[in-house]
Image (cartoon, rainbow, N blue to C red):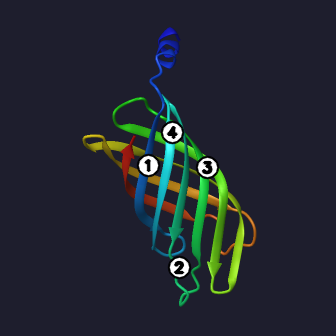
Amino acid sequence: MLMAMGVLLLARPAAADVTFFLGTNPTPDYRMTRGIAAGVNMLVVGFEFDYSHTNGNEETGIPKLQTGMLNVLVMTPTKTQVYFTAGAGGFREYLGDVSETNWGTNVGGGLKLSILGPLQLRLDYRVFALRGEVKYRNPQRFYGGVTIPF
């Protein structure tokens, strides 16, 4: 218990980072998603905002999806960081003239690996729970991105 308290008391200063990502949303069919996440990380807790845009396909009736989420991350205080995240925010699902704008939540996790100097490779998986009259209530997202700390 004393060791745990010691680790928490020796917290390093908060560090910020930004991640540019590309990935896939396999709900209901694989579609490209892209976005950006920016956050502040402390020793084991972090906060971030992420925005993503997922392509749709009008021919097959699959809507586009935009999300903007505020997330809390709990991570390991190591060079390679494993993290779990949960958050909430807004979204817009749209197909042609039909759209739904509402709020939703997400949970997920991932890891950040150092690749070159301060740059990190980030791998992330999320499951969303969207509210309202949506076509796909629980889309998923997997992405890889480059994280730049500052």
The image quarter in which residue 97 lies: bottom right
- Give the crowd class for mark 3: few <14, some 14-19, many >=20 residues within 10 Å: some
> Real-space Cα distance between discs 1 and 3?
14 Å
Mark 2 lies on residue: 56
Asked if residue 91 is positioned above or below residue 7 in the image, the reply reads below
Residue 19 image point, x, y percent: 42, 52
Which mark is first along the chain, 1 or 2?
1
66 and 132: which is toward the camera: 66
Helix or strand or loop: what does disc 4 sit on?
Answer: strand
Helix or strand or loop: what does disc 3 sit on?
Answer: strand
Look at 65% across and 69% down and name the residue there: 92
> Real-space Cα distance between discs 2 and 1?
26 Å
- Give the crowd class for mark 2: few <14, some 14-19, many >=20 residues within 10 Å: many
10 and 4: which is toward the camera: 10
Total numbered badges shown on the rendered structure: 4
Dots 4, 1 in contact, CB < 8 A: no
13 and 83: which is toward the camera: 13
Mark 3 lies on residue: 70
Mark 4 lies on residue: 40
Residue situated furthest bottom in the rendering: 59
Asked if residue 42 is positioned above or below residue 114 in the image, the reply reads above
> Real-space Cα distance between discs 3 and 4?
12 Å
Dots 2, 4 in contact, CB < 8 A: no
Mark 1 lies on residue: 18
Which mark is first along the chain, 4 or 3?
4
Amino acid, disc 1: Val
Which mark is first along the chain, 2 or 3?
2
Amino acid, disc 2: Gly
